[in-house]
């Protein structure tokens, strides 16, 4: 969180702390740092003891405020961190008792599946496997997805979330459309359910009126098995609209294959 919430972009100096301080020690000069799904981008200029000096290269023209609980992406940095934090391990006891599945963030390698299974076993879950939703949000997860699927489907229910916010910040916005298509193809070939996530109908959920671009985006989500909406004051209206939209689009797609059916105005 920034000291006094200074604005990035107006020339003010600022400082911020991160929830995982060890990531700072992995940075190298020249590494890119992206904040809040890429709304702000900087580059590491110098490094000190537990600190990194980052020069901001991209932000809104009017400036951007640093706020707590926003994501940080380091697309050039090999973090080498476990996807399971100490808090995750503590939370697993409640998850095992109350949930049927778990969302697994920053899963990247087949070994990460084994890591989660070992943690679940330590908590005594033996009656049935806990389903996994693997959030695909880093380049190495893209490269390793076939191996991840092969490892995960042997253990029980498994699905993939296309976490488009972090994924775009990691691989670049210009490659997101290409990569989400690749993910849908792989999941269809492996008979693994895919979840289309991040900012679906966000303007509608937040303000009550959808943009043209997000309507097209939501229509393309019909090729996934599940669509995730964020919370907001108009989420009920968004659910109704999405249900109607996906029902109409269902006649055009069978997963990734167009049906080329006859078009009618209404």
Image (cartoon, grey):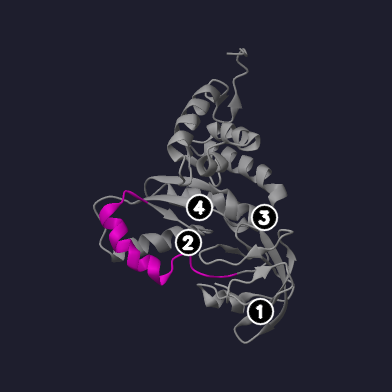
- Residue at screen point 58% across, 22% down: 252
Q: Earlier along the polypeptide chain: callout 4 or callout 2?
A: 2
Residue 183 seen in the current view: yes
Q: Earlier along the polypeptide chain: callout 2 or callout 1?
A: 1
Q: Which of marks 3 and 2 is in front?
A: 3
Check the image and report above or below for 16 versus 252: below
Which residue position holds label 1?
52
Q: Earlier along the polypeptide chain: callout 1 or callout 3?
A: 1
Residue 48 located left or right of residue 190 = right
Q: Earlier along the polypeptide chain: callout 4 or callout 1?
A: 1
Residue 200 seen in the current view: no
- Report x, y in % for residue 234: 47, 40
Magenta segment: 79-101
Q: What quarter of the picture does the C terminus occupy?
A: top right
Q: Nearer the viewer, mark 4 or mark 1?
A: 1
The part of the image, by quadrant, that contains residue 218 is top right
Q: What element carries label 2?
A: helix
- Report x, y in % for residue 253: 56, 25
Q: Distance between the residues labelled 2 and 1?
A: 31 Å
Q: How far apart are marks 1 and 3 (CA)?
A: 22 Å
Q: How far apart are marks 3 and 2 (CA)?
A: 22 Å
- Report x, y in % for residue 48: 66, 85
Which residue position holds label 3?
171
Q: Nearer the viewer, mark 4 or mark 2?
A: 4
Check the image and report above or below for 113 versus 164: below
Which residue position holds label 2?
111
Q: Are marks 1 and 3 in contact (CB under 8 Å)?
A: no
Which residue position holds label 4?
135
Q: Is mark 3 on a helix, strand or loop?
A: helix
């Amino acid at each position: 969180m920034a000291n006094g919430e200074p604005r990035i972009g107006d020339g003010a100096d600022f400082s911020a702390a991160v929830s995982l301080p060890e990531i700072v020690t992995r940075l190298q000069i020249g590494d890119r740092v992206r904040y809040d799904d890429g709304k702000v981008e900087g580059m590491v200029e110098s490094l000190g003891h537990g600190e990194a000096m980052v020069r901001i290269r991209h932000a809104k023209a009017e400036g951007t405020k640093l706020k707590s609980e926003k994501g940080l992406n380091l697309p050039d940095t090999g973090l080498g961190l476990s996807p399971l934090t100490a808090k995750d391990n503590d939370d697993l006891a409640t998850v095992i008792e109350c949930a049927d599945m778990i969302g697994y963030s920053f899963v990247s390698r087949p070994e990460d599946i084994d890591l989660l299974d070992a943690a679940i076993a330590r908590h005594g879950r033996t009656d049935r496997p806990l389903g996994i939703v693997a959030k695909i949000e880093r380049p190495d997860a893209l490269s390793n997805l076939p191996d991840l699927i092969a490892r995960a489907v042997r253990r029980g229910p498994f699905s993939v979330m296309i976490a488009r916010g972090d994924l775009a910040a990691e691989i670049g916005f210009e490659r997101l459309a290409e990569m989400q298509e690749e993910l849908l193809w792989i999941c269809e070939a492996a008979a693994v359910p895919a979840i289309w996530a991040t900012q679906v109908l966000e303007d509608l959920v937040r303000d009550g009126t959808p943009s043209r671009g997000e309507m097209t985006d939501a229509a393309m989500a019909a090729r996934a098995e599940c669509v995730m909406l964020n919370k907001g004051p108009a989420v009920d209206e968004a659910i109704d609209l999405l249900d109607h939209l996906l029902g109409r689009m269902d006649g055009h797609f069978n997963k990734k294959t167009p049906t080329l059916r006859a078009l009618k105005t209404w």
